[in-house]
Amino acid sequence: MAEINANGQTNGPAGQPQLVLQKIYVKDVSFEAPNAPQIFQEIGEITEAPQVQLNLTQRATGLGNDLYEVVLSLTLTCTVNERTAYLAEVHQAGLFGIAGFAEVDHAGIIGSYCPNLLFPYARQVISGLVQEGGFPPFLLQPINFEALYAEQQRRAGGEPRTLNS
């Protein structure tokens, strides 16, 4: 089993793959309700459901010594009658120690495993922002990051792989 030393590095048996979550944190967050308070009246009067769009991105930055920052960015935009009701955005980040994996597995961990771990935290922040903004609760449905990663690999011409293959 790997241990984290005082410098945040992983210590473990030589040659053994190591994956250590060191920290999860909110890197950036914002909420806008550009048409408040009028939009609250419109929500009560509309006959069709508000339109909600989710944009999802992720990026990973190598920090040296097998340490990576992975940032999952979610932007949720809700429109009512083609007017923006709210825009909620969170950049949920994590620090991961990743060492000893084959390159393809390493890429899969960063592209699938890490965002999957960060998503529940980002979902909770988005939900809180929407409710605290005065709007009805909104719960994001789970996202299959492994399938998204496999599709991304397929489009890039690479063989999709699971973390277990």
Image (tube, helix red, strand yellow):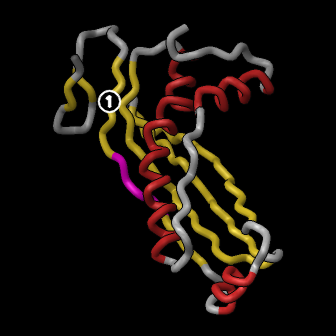
The residue positioned 64% from the left and 61% from the top of the image is 76
Q: From the image, tell me which residue sits under label 1.
A: 20
Residue 122 is left or right of residue 58, and the answer is left
Q: Quadrant of residue 18?
A: top left
- The image shows residue 107, relative to residue 34, as above or below, that is above
- The image shows residue 37, relative to residue 135, as above or below, that is below
The residue positioned 59% from the left and 39% from the top of the image is 143
- The image shows residue 7, relative to residue 100, as above or below, that is below
Amino acid of disc 1: Val
Q: In terms of depth relative to the viewer, which is nearer, 122 or 139?
A: 139
Residue 79 spot, x, y in % from top left: 74, 71
Q: Which residues are magenta?
A: 24-28
The residue positioned 21% from the left and 31% from the top of the image is 4
Q: In terms of depth relative to the viewer, which is nearer, 61 or 20?
A: 20
The residue positioned 79% from the left and 69% from the top of the image is 48
Q: Quadrant of residue 12?
A: top left
- The image shows residue 155, relative to residue 161, as above or below, that is below
Residue 5 is left or right of residue 152, and the answer is left
The quarter of the rendered structure image containing the C terminus is top right
Q: In terms of depth relative to the viewer, which is nearer, 100 or 46?
A: 46
Q: Main secondary structure of the magenta part?
A: strand
Query: What is the crowding at mark 1: few (fewer than 14 residues within 10 Å), some, or many (at least 20)?
Result: some
Residue 7 spot, x, y in % from top left: 22, 38
The quarter of the rendered structure image containing the N terminus is top left
Q: Is label 1 in a helix, a strand or a loop?
A: strand
Asked if the stretch drawn in magenta spans residue 65, the answer is no
Q: Residue furthest bottom?
A: 38
